Each structure stands twice: as C-alpha cells, then as structure tokens.
Image: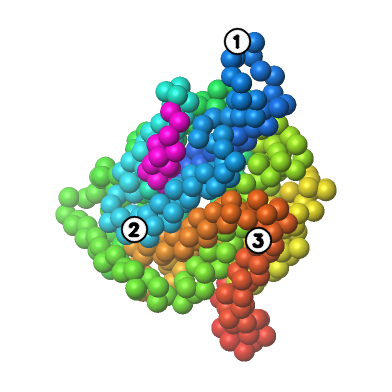
C-alpha cells in the first residue's frame, strides 16, 4: 500500500515537472524566434527613410546642397531606380535564406540544437548591427549592404528548423495545431516589435533601427546557450519517445546526467538522420512545400513592401506607416491560432489552408487602403493563417510521419525542406513587387491573387483525400 502511494506521488511530481519543462521550453523557443523575426523587420521600415520626398522635408540651415530633389536621401538609394535597389537588398537576404535553408535542416539533425541556435542568433545579431553601423560609418556602397544581407540570411536559416524540432520533441500530436498556432504567433509578435523598435529611431538615426534589434537577438543567443533543453524523453503516449527498446530513461539535460542506480546501464539508440530524397518521399511533403512557396510569396511581399505601400498611397511618414503595418501582423496572430484550432478539430490541415487561401484572394487588393485598419487585420489573418499552419503543425506532423517508424531525427530536415521551398517564394515575391510596382500597385496585387490561387491548386489532391475521409471512404487522420 505504501509503495502504491509512493509511486502515485512520484508520478504526480514527475507530471508537474514535465508540464513546467514544457511551458519553459515553449516560452524560450517563442522568445528565440520572436528575436529572429524582430531583427528581419527593420529593413522594411527604413526603406521609406532611405528614399524620401525631399521637397516636403525642412532643410537644415547649415546644409549647402543645391540638389533639392535628393538632398535628404541616403546614397545609393537617392536614384530613380531606388525600388530596384531595395529589391536587391531584399533578395540578397531572401535568396541566401532560401538556399541556406535546404542545408540548415541537415546540419540541425547532426549538431546539438543548443549550440546551433546560439551560433545562429549571435551571428545574426552581428550582421544586423553591421548594417546599422553603415549609418555611423557613412557607408554608401550597395555592395556592403547586399553582402551584410547575404550573411544575415544564412545566419537566419539556423532558427526555424531548430526551434520546430525542439518543440516537436516536447509535444505530441494531440493538440499540436492549437499549441503551435499559439506558439507561432512569435512570427507576428517579432514583426510588430521589430516595426515599433525600428520606427522609434528611423527618423532620427536609422542606424539604431538595426543596432537595437541586433543586440536583442545576440542576447537571446546567450540565453539559449545556457538554458535551452533540446528534448525530454517520456514513456507516455502524448510524446513520441526518443529512446526505443529501453526500460530505463537517461534523464540527461544538455549533458548533465541525473543519478541512476549503479547497476543500470542506459543504452540510447541514435537512428540515422534521414536523407534529402527520403524526406521528399514522405506523403504530403511535396504538396505542402509547393503550397507554402506561393503562400509565403504573398506573406513576405506584405512583410517587405507594406510599409512603403502605405507611405506612398496614404502619404504617411515612415514611423506612421510602420506602426500601421503592424495591424497586418496582429491579424496574423489570430489567423494562425484559428487555423490550428480548426485543423485540430476537423483533422483537415490541407482543407483548412485551402479555405483560408480562397478567402484571402479577394482581400488582397488595391482597395485595401480604402478601409485600411479593418482590412489589414482581416487580410493578415487569412494570409498568415495557412503559412503559420504549414510551417508549424504540418511540418511537425510530416516530420514524425508513421512511415518514418519513429525516426525522430527527420523532423529538422522535413521542416527545412518545407520552409526552404517556401523561402524561394519569399525571395521571388518582394523581387517581383520591386519590378512590378513602378507599373502600378494594382499589378502587384494581381500577382498576389494569382499566387493565392496557385497555392490552393497544389493542395487539391490532399483536400480531396481529406474529404473522402470525412465521407467515410478513406482513413481520417486527425492532427
């Protein structure tokens, strides 16, 4: 009787500790990726300061510059092709990010996540600060800023596969859509904070719009090194155990091993990391990857061009345009959570994404500015909902697919393939916006509507399969 009572107390204590650990890891990874996105946002806010309408700016009395048209602009962005040059900066980051992402997942499977994330955040902080220091060092070379963007893009690839793998190791499939929907709000929170921080300095000293976010992400890198716990082995059904065929669990945390009886020998299996082709063969990976390519094209076009669009069309100052653009990200938070909840309840990840993308298409229009605030919120929710669901719950589902037979080391690679393919769209979208926008903003929005439609088409087979499951003609998979 005493032993039963003792084991009951021990089980409850273990459960409470497990819940605390899960909450702590969820908070930490949320904080980490908030910092990643926070450090990406300043460039979109600073654009409208690098090239301004100088005829509306009061010239300082001690300024002896005769060229009234561009005296307040920052060279080399003082030329008529400034939108093309902004496109070069965007794509220097995004192309490097897209290429690096395909390799990042493989590194993430083979290196300790704690070290990998810490290195990435410190590196990203360094290059973000170097971009801002160009203001104080009076650097006017496009090559300098483009190189910084390339290096920052490569550093940023360390984040997503690692944090998704970490959260996927701690949480099972039961409520993964809702949990990751809430957790994925870090993307929008980071964008909002990045906009507000950059906006606070943009009009006085735009270099600080980069330096402050750079210091923040570097600080979170140090935090990661000391506090991140990569995974927790548990024998209950909620999480997939990382140890197989062992009656004892090695409760090690970053190399610190808890006391075990002397006669117990803990044997831990290390399955091989999955190959690139092996990850592509998992059912659903190709379809969701191609869907994300076009969904992310839309989302990142808004991310990089929305403040400039608001500034040009509504004639707002750089800070006002940046603050207004945060409404799109607020809508994205609600959209991501809603997508996770609905997909958990229905078991239809693809159908949830498809319905939201169809609803988003008419919202993505030049008339957005007419009813700006409400439309930005709604559009943000519908555009970012599918993007958030695919990059979190869907990636985690496919990375722990039954065909992998419990190989937990596939999660980072699958996540990197899906997000890497999406990042190609993220690179193409802002580039096309830079090329098309001189012909009129209407044409940019036609491009975005077309991308939404294509994203839906790539999910059509999976939507049909889910519909068959609901009608009782096929297996229904929930979560």
User: Gap in Å between the C-alphas at discs 3 and 1?
Assistant: 46 Å
Q: Residue at x 76, y 63 (%)?
A: 362
Is residue 121 part of the magenta span, yes or no?
Answer: no
User: Gap in Å between the C-alphas at discs 3 and 2?
Assistant: 28 Å
Highlighted magenta segment, given as a residue range = 139-153
- In the image, 61 versus 352, the foreground residue is 61
Total count of labels: 3
User: Gap in Å between the C-alphas at discs 2 and 1?
Assistant: 52 Å
* Image x and y of residue 231, in percent: 37, 52
Q: Which mark is residue 448?
A: 3
Q: Is residue 378 above or below residue 78?
A: below
Q: Which mark is residue 62?
A: 1
Is residue 144 part of the magenta span, yes or no?
Answer: yes
- In the image, 140 versus 126, the foreground residue is 140
- In the image, 398 versus 21, the foreground residue is 398
Between discs 3 and 2, the one toward the N terminus:
2
Q: Secondary structure at mark 3?
A: helix
* Image x and y of residue 417, in percent: 42, 64
Q: Residue at x 16, y 54 (%)?
A: 263
Determine contact: label 3, label 2, CB under 8 Å.
no
**Crowd rating for badge 1 (residues with CA inside 10 Å; few <14, some 14–19, many 20+):** few
Determine contact: label 2, label 1, CB under 8 Å.
no
In the picture provided, is 288 more to the left or to the right than 153?
A: right
- In the image, 165 versus 203, the foreground residue is 203
> Residue 193 falls in which quadrant of the image?
top right
**Crowd rating for badge 2 (residues with CA inside 10 Å; few <14, some 14–19, many 20+):** some
Where is mark 2, residue-wise? 103
Q: Nearer the viewer, mark 3 or mark 1?
A: 1
* Image x and y of residue 95, in percent: 44, 54
Which quadrant, please, contains the N terminus? bottom left
């Amino acid at each position: 009787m005493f032993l039963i009572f003792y084991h009951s107390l021990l089980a409850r204590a273990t459960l409470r500790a497990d819940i605390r650990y899960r909450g702590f890891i969820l908070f930490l990874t949320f904080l980490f990726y908030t910092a990643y996105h926070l450090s990406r946002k300043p460039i979109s806010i600073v654009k409208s300061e690098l090239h301004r309408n100088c005829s509306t700016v009061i010239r300082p009395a001690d300024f002896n510059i005769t060229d009234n048209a561009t005296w307040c602009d920052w060279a080399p962005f003082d030329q008529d092709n400034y939108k093309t040059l902004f496109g070069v900066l965007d794509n220097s980051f995004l192309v490097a990010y897209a290429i690096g992402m395909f390799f990042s997942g493989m590194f993430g499977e083979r290196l300790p996540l704690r070290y990998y994330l810490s290195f990435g955040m410190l590196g990203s902080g360094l290059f973000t600060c170097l971009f801002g220091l160009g203001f104080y060092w009076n650097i006017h070379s496009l090559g300098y800023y483009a190189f910084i963007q390339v290096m920052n893009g490569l550093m940023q690839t360390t984040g997503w596969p690692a944090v998704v793998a970490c959260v996927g190791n701690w949480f099972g499939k039961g409520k993964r859509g809702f949990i990751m929907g809430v957790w994925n709000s870090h993307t929008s929170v980071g964008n909002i904070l990045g906009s507000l921080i950059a906006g606070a300095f943009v009009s006085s000293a735009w270099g600080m719009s980069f330096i402050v976010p750079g210091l923040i992400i570097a600080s979170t890198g140090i935090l990661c090194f000391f506090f991140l716990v990569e995974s927790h082995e548990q024998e209950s059904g909620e999480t997939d155990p990382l140890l197989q065929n062992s009656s004892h669990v090695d409760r090690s945390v970053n190399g610190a091993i808890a006391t075990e009886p002397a006669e117990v020998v803990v044997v831990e299996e290390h399955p091989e990391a999955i190959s690139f082709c092996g990850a592509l063969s998992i059912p659903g990976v190709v379809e969701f990857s191609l869907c994300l390519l076009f969904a992310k094209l839309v989302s990142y076009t808004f991310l990089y061009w929305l403040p400039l669009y608001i500034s040009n069309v509504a004639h707002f100052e750089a800070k006002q345009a940046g603050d207004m653009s945060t409404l799109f990200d607020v809508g994205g938070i609600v959209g991501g959570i809603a997508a996770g909840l609905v997909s958990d309840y229905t078991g239809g990840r693809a159908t949830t994404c498809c319905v939201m993308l169809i609803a988003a298409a008419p919202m993505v229009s030049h008339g957005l500015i007419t009813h700006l605030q409400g439309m930005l919120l709604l559009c943000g929710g519908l555009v970012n909902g599918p993007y958030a669901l695919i990059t979190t719950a869907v990636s985690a589902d496919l990375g722990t697919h039954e065909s992998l037979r419990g190989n937990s080391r596939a999660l980072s690679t699958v996540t990197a393939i899906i997000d890497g393919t999406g990042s190609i769209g993220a690179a193409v979208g802002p580039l096309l916006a830079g090329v098309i926008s001189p012909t009129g903003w209407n044409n940019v929005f036609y491009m975005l509507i077309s991308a939404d439609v294509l994203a839906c088409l790539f999910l059509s087979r999976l939507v049909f399969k889910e519909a068959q499951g609901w009608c009782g003609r096929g297996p229904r998979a929930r979560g």
